[in-house]
Image (cartoon, rainbow, N blue to C red):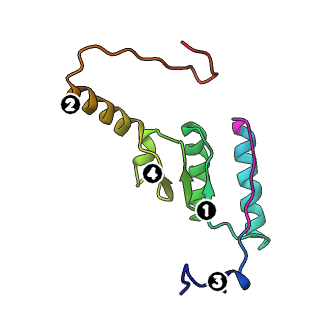
Amino acid sequence: KTSRTNPSFLKSNSISFSYNNTLYNYDQVIYDKCQLINKQKQNQNRILAVIGPAGSSVTINVQNLLQLFDIPQIGYSATSVDLSDKKAFKTFLRVVPSDYLQVKAMVDVVITMNWTYLFAIYTDGNKKLI
C-alpha cells in the first residue's frame, strides 16, 4: 500500500507518459494506440491508462480497442452520451458531463431564471463564427 505523503514512493518507481498531437488525424490516433499496445505486449511498457483523444467519435473507436486489453481510457472532452453506456464502454471514464447532461443543466438554468428569449453563438469546430 502506498501513501500519497510517502516521499520514498518514487524512489523505487517511475512514471512515464507518451504525448501525441494527432491534430484530429483519426487514423494516426488508432495507429499510435496500436503501437502502444504492441509495446506493452512485448513487455517494453505497461499501460495503466490512456487519456484522450479529444473528439467523441475517435474516442469511441479508441475505447473499442483499449477495452479488449482492459486498459482504462479517460475522456477529457468526449461528451457523446453513447460513452455513458457502461455495457458498451466498460473501461471508459469521463471528466466532463455528457452532451445530454450539459443541455439538461442549460435548460434548468433557463427555467429557473424564467428567461423567455435566448441568443446562441457557436462555431462549426473550425473556429469560424456562425
Q: Which mark is residue 7?
A: 3
Disc 2 is placed on an element classified as helix
Could you say where residue 12 lies in the image, as x and y percent from the top left? 72, 85
Which amino acid type is shown beneath numbered disc 1?
Ala
Query: In the rendered structure, which disc, 3 or 2, sits on the residue that comes first in sequence?
Result: 3
Upstream in the sequence, badge 3 or badge 1? 3
Name the kind of residue labelled 2 in the image: Thr
On residue 112, the disc is 2
Q: Nearer the viewer, mark 3 or mark 1?
A: 3
The span from disc 3 to disc 2 (Cα, nearest Å) is: 49 Å
Distance from Cα at disc 4 to Cα at disc 2? 35 Å
Callout 1: helix, strand or loop? loop
Which one is earlier in the sequence, the residue at label 4 or at label 1?
1
The percent position of residue 60, horizontal first and vertical second, equals 55, 44
**Tag nearer the camera, 4 or 3:** 3
Residue beneath disc 1: 49
